[in-house]
Amino acid sequence: MRNGRVELATRPEGRASEGLRGEQTAEPSASDLFLPEPEPRPVRYTVISVDDHLVEPADMFEGRLAAKFQDRAPRIVETEQGQQV
């Protein structure tokens, strides 16, 4: 503050705004908010997506559960129309 006036603290790329206590401050520029882009590095790994949807084999649970659970095991049933559900 000089001569009773608030001076604006601005940067060439910034604009003036009001701070928390009413003082004038400069808005941060993009260079103040973000880190610089890193230097490119050589590719050392191949990325393979494992978030794909798999279809289990139709007989996946046959013979793999205890006998008392076999009647409740998931299985594919063919309808009268020939559709598998």
Image (spheres, grey):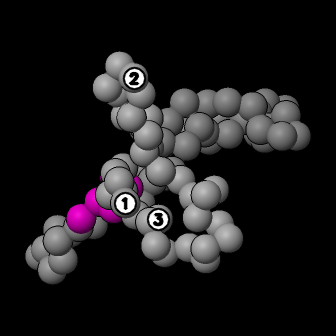
Mark 3 belongs to which amino acid?
Answer: Phe
Q: Secondary structure at mark 2?
A: loop
Q: Position of residue 54 (x, y in %)?
A: 34, 53
Q: Relative to the observer, which residue lies in front, 81 or 42? A: 81
Q: Residue 12 appears in which quarter of the rendering?
A: top left
Q: Is residue 78 above or below residue 45?
A: above
Q: Which numbered mark, 2 or 1, is in the foreground of this view?
A: 2
- Residue 61 is tagged as 3
Q: Which one is earlier in the sequence, the residue at label 3 or at label 2?
A: 3
Residue lying farthest to the bottom in this orientation = 44
For the residues labelled 2 and 1, the Cα–Cα distance comes to: 20 Å
Label pair 2/1, CB-CB below 8 angstroms: no
Calculate the distance from the C-alpha at mark 3 to the C-alpha at mark 1: 6 Å
State whether the magenta stretch is mostly helix, strand or loop.
loop
Residue receiving disc 2: 80
Which one is in front, 60 or 32? 60
Q: Is residue 51 magenta?
A: yes
* Front residue of 70 and 32: 70
User: Residue 19: x and y, percent?
Assistant: 77, 38
* Residue at the image point whose x is 65% and y is 66% from the top: 69
- Count residues near mark 2 (Cα–Cα under 10 Å), then give few for <14, some for 14-19, many for 20+: few
Residues drawn in magenta: 48-52
The residue labelled by disc 1 is 59
Mark 3 or mark 2, which is nearer to you? Answer: 2
27 over 50 or under it: above or below: above
Residue 33 shown left or right of residue 44 in the figure: right
Residue 42 location, x and y as percent?
A: 11, 76
Give the farthest residue toward the right. 21
Number of disc labels: 3
Whether residue 3 is visible here, answered yes or no, is: no
Label 2 or label 1, whichever comes before in sequence order: 1
Q: Residue at x 65, y 35 (%)?
A: 8
